[in-house]
Image (cartoon, helix red, strand yellow):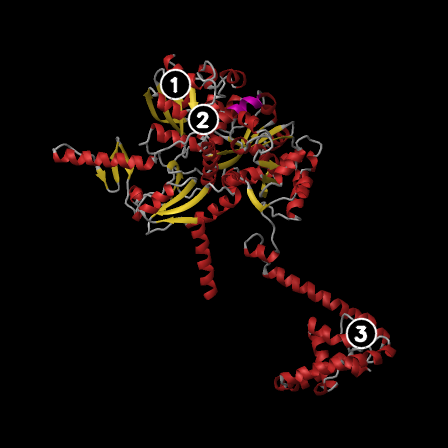
């Protein structure tokens, strides 16, 4: 207990050293006057600081080693400046740069905290160097609370004057026409908020009358417009918004342009959670340069509606942090909607049969994408007649079976793994009825009706009829496979987000390891890039910090992972695959966040290099030893029948050498004392004739009670003396045994007896009978008796 108490006190002391404690207004003001970036965990005494983030803070501090970065915990109960956080601070992290609030994070979101710390430290260094200005923000939630308080005061005044006041219902109250949660300190909603982005339709597009057209194009992409406010920016507002461009030659012209007329300020989100809305909207508006947008993304909004570099029609937040700053800047009172949670995705198998694949592949794929399906797996292949018969064996005996399997094996087809919230029913609905006549009559727009082949009664598509069938059929076309996935040092701070996307893509993480590579291992790992110009830089980067290695299992895991991570160059990834990991987390072609094996053979080599020999179960998990697999249900424990068969097999193995020895005994007729050298595996073989075993059995039955009495009465000390006596007499026994030839192995027999108990009753009886004959009270070894 004392050791545990000391360890607990030591941990508490380390936390205090890591995080400065602020409990009074004077201490708060002292911290606000100091230079550096303070990450402050605001808490109340009843709940305490966020202990779960201490490890994260420690890791960031160790990784960055920046003296400007400091941590503190502040008790809102006793600090006047934090009065408004009482009842609204769990968990809440405030980022103060030399007394100025520059960022706020609500919730123990470690990836977001790590990103924000890194970005704000970079910004603070620029401010200190004089190359940037510090950007102060308001806490959006506290601003909303202030507005609510004002509304409540107005309601009270209205009530006193006899006018109807705003409705209040339990923990909800009316705020600008909407009901919002407003609980006390012991009952506050911890629901996560949607991801949002801020967009600006600039004065040039507004003056050209393009607002309605742009809004319609935004909505057509499934993007929800949460707020739309027309306003003319002041010079101060425009300057604050574009501080990062103040060194550009066109900065003054840009400010003059942004204040020349009204703009539309929008708050956007998408779907249940708003996930990836920032990148999706930036992809929709296209590159900053209108000329580049027209060349590379002619369908983007800037390409359609922009004029020149800064008169490019639209603006979109470049990061989550910037989005929150701009939201606080333009709409300080706005409450972000609560996320609805991610829907459960289904997977289903879709087959485009040979005839439709040959003539309509691209059109069908386009329709699949438009229907909201995500193509998680894709493979072009040809089936043999036997493979087709195996896949459709449940239909064997039907009159259409032969034509179906013949058509399925007549040429290349496409197998797809489709993912959507209702993938099974959604895909079957798109297909329409199986019978072509019925499909043409009842669902003329269905795939089976639309792409029917003349004079062919077999429809051109297949879809799984249940989730269970989908899994079975996907396993047929996309067998389980492993690949190596690597989160590089530059992206390790976002590993939690990346791992979440790994799971969302249907991968199982069979094994993982976080380690720092030596240069030698990095060189070996990337040996296939040895002739490239960037090889040395790549090796140095991979050895520069911790790296996360994962073994991923999934159907067609190699291609699936490479599709998820996107092109090697993050810039190219942003254009071609904006939702890929390299587009989201990569910096440049060297620091591109993640790596994946190029083919199954390389995957096996990489797994061997990092993890050694691994074996996997049929469902992709790491294989365990037999007992552990039984405990966890990976394999069935042996049945009683199997156990009986195992015992019978062991008995057969035991009886077989005994029968051979008995036959040898009958032929050779040796004396009772002799034991042939070949019979070392049966150390207790004393019977040498057919009659002797019977005599020994009889003798055993008569003398067994005596043996039991002796065993019960013999003290432990006597047993030890017997063992010592055996050890002392063993050398003498070896010398005496040598002239007898075949008996030199007999001194080892007692040891064999202790290690391998007798396997049959006959052997046990023989051993005990022989012990009686040799006067067990004197405890001589069998070797001594023979000699």
* Label 2: element kind: helix
What label sits on residue 258 in the rendered view?
1
With respect to residue 632, does 381 lie above or below?
A: above
Asked if one can make out residue 554 in the rendered structure from this viewpoint, the answer is no
What x and y, as percent, mark residue 685? 77, 75
Q: How many marks?
A: 3
Disc 3 crowd rating (10 Å Cα; few below 14, some 14-19, many 20+) is some
Q: Nearer the viewer, residue 310 or 235?
A: 235
Residue extending farthest top: 208
Labels 2 and 1: the sequence-earlier one: 2
Horizontally, is 182 left or right of 429 in the view?
left
Residue depicted at x 84% and y 81%: 736
Q: Nearer the viewer, residue 766 or 498?
A: 498
Q: Residue at x 82, y 78 (%)?
A: 734
Q: Position of residue 702 (x, y in %)?
A: 68, 86
Q: Judge whether residue 131 is colored magenta.
A: no
Q: Which is in the foreground here, disc 3 or disc 1?
A: 1
Image quarter for residue 206? top left
Q: Helix or strand or loop: what does disc 3 sit on? A: loop
Q: Which residue is mark 2?
A: 244
Circle nearer the viewer, 3 or 2: 2
Secondary element at image label 1: helix
How far apart are the two marked residues, 2 and 1, measured between alpha carbons? 15 Å
- Judged left or right of residue 648, residue 2 is left
How many angstroms separate mark 3 from mark 2 (CA)?
90 Å
- Residue at which label 3 appears: 745
Q: Give the main secondary structure of the magenta stretch.
A: helix
Tag 1: Cα neighbours inside 10 Å, few (<14), some, or many (≥20)? many
Q: Which residues are magenta?
A: 360-366
Camera-side residue: 63 or 376? 63
Q: Give the mark, 3 or 1, whose residue is nearer the N terminus.
A: 1
């Amino acid at each position: 207990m004392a050791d545990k108490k000391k360890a607990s006190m030591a941990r508490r002391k380390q936390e205090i050293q890591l995080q400065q404690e602020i409990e009074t207004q004077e201490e708060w003001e002292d911290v606000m006057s100091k230079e550096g970036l303070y990450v402050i965990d605001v808490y109340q005494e009843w709940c305490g600081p966020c202990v779960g983030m201490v490890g994260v803070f420690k890791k960031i501090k160790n990784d960055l080693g920046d003296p400007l970065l400091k941590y503190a915990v502040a008790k809102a109960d006793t600090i006047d400046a934090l009065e408004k956080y009482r009842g609204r601070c769990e968990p809440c992290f405030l980022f103060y740069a030399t007394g100025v609030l520059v960022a706020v994070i609500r919730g123990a979101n470690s990836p977001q905290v790590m990103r924000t710390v890194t970005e704000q430290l970079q910004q603070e260094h620029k401010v200190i160097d004089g190359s940037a200005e510090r950007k102060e923000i308001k806490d959006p939630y506290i601003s909303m609370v202030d507005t609510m308080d004002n509304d409540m005061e107005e309601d009270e005044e209205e009530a006193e004057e006899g006018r109807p006041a705003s409705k209040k219902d339990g923990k909800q109250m009316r705020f600008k026409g909407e009901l919002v949660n407003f609980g006390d300190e012991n009952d506050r909603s911890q629901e996560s908020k949607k991801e949002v982005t801020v967009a600006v339709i600039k004065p040039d597009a507004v003056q050209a009358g393009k607002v309605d057209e742009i809004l319609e194009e935004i909505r057509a992409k499934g993007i929800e417009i949460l707020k739309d406010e027309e306003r003319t920016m002041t010079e101060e507002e425009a300057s604050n918004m574009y501080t990062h461009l103040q060194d550009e030659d066109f900065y003054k012209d840009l400010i003059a342009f942004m204040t020349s007329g009204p703009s539309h300020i929008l708050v956007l989100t998408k779907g249940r959670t708003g996930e990836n809305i920032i990148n999706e909207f930036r992809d929709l508006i296209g590159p900053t340069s209108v000329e580049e947008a027209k060349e590379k993304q002619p369908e983007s909004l800037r390409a359609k509606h922009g004029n020149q570099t800064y008169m490019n029609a639209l603006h979109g937040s470049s990061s989550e942090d910037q989005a929150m700053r701009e939201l606080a800047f333009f709409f300080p009172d706005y409450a972000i909607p609560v996320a609805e949670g991610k829907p459960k995705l289904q997977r289903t198998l879709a087959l485009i049969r040979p005839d439709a694949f040959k003539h309509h592949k691209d059109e069908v794929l386009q329709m699949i994408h438009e229907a909201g399906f995500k193509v998680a797996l894709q493979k072009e292949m040809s089936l043999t007649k036997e493979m087709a018969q195996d896949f459709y064996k449940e239909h064997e005996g039907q009159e259409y079976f032969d034509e179906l399997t013949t058509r399925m094996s007549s040429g290349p087809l496409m197998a797809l793994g489709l993912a959507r919230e209702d993938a099974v029913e959604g895909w079957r609905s798109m297909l329409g009825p199986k019978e072509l006549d019925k499909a043409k009559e009842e669902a003329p727009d269905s795939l089976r009706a639309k792409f029917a082949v003349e004079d062919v009664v077999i429809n051109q598509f297949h879809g799984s009829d249940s989730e269970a069938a989908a899994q079975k059929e996907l396993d047929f076309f996309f067998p389980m496979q492993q690949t190596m996935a690597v989160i590089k040092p530059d992206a390790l701070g976002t590993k939690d987000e990346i791992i979440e996307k790994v799971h969302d893509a249907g991968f199982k993480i069979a094994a993982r390891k976080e380690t720092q590579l030596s240069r030698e291992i990095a060189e070996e790992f990337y040996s296939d890039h040895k002739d490239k110009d960037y090889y040395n830089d790549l090796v140095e980067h991979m050895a520069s910090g911790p790296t996360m290695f994962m073994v991923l299992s999934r159907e067609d895991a190699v291609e699936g992972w490479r599709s998820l991570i996107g092109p090697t160059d993050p810039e190219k990834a942003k254009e071609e695959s904006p939702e890929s990991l390299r587009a989201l987390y990569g910096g440049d072609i060297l620091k591109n966040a993640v790596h994946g094996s190029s083919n199954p053979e390389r995957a096996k080599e990489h797994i061997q290099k990092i993890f050694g020999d691994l074996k996997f179960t049929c469902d992709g998990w790491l294989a365990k030893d037999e007992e552990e697999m039984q405990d966890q249900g990976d394999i069935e424990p042996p049945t009683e029948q199997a156990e009986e068969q195992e015992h019978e097999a062991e008995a057969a193995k035991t009886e077989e050498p005994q029968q051979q020895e008995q036959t040898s005994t009958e032929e050779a007729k040796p004396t009772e004392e002799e034991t042939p050298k070949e019979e070392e595996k049966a150390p207790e073989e004393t019977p040498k004739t057919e009659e002797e075993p019977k005599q020994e059995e009889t003798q055993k039955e008569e003398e067994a009670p005596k043996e039991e009495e002796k065993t019960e009465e013999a003290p432990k000390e006597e047993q030890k003396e017997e063992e010592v006596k055996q050890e002392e007499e063993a050398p003498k026994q070896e010398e005496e045994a040598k002239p007898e030839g075949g008996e030199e192995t007999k001194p080892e027999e007692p040891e064999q007896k202790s290690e391998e108990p007798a396997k049959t009753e006959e052997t046990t009886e023989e051993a005990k009978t022989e012990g009686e004959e040799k006067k067990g009270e004197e405890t001589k070894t069998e070797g001594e008796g023979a000699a």
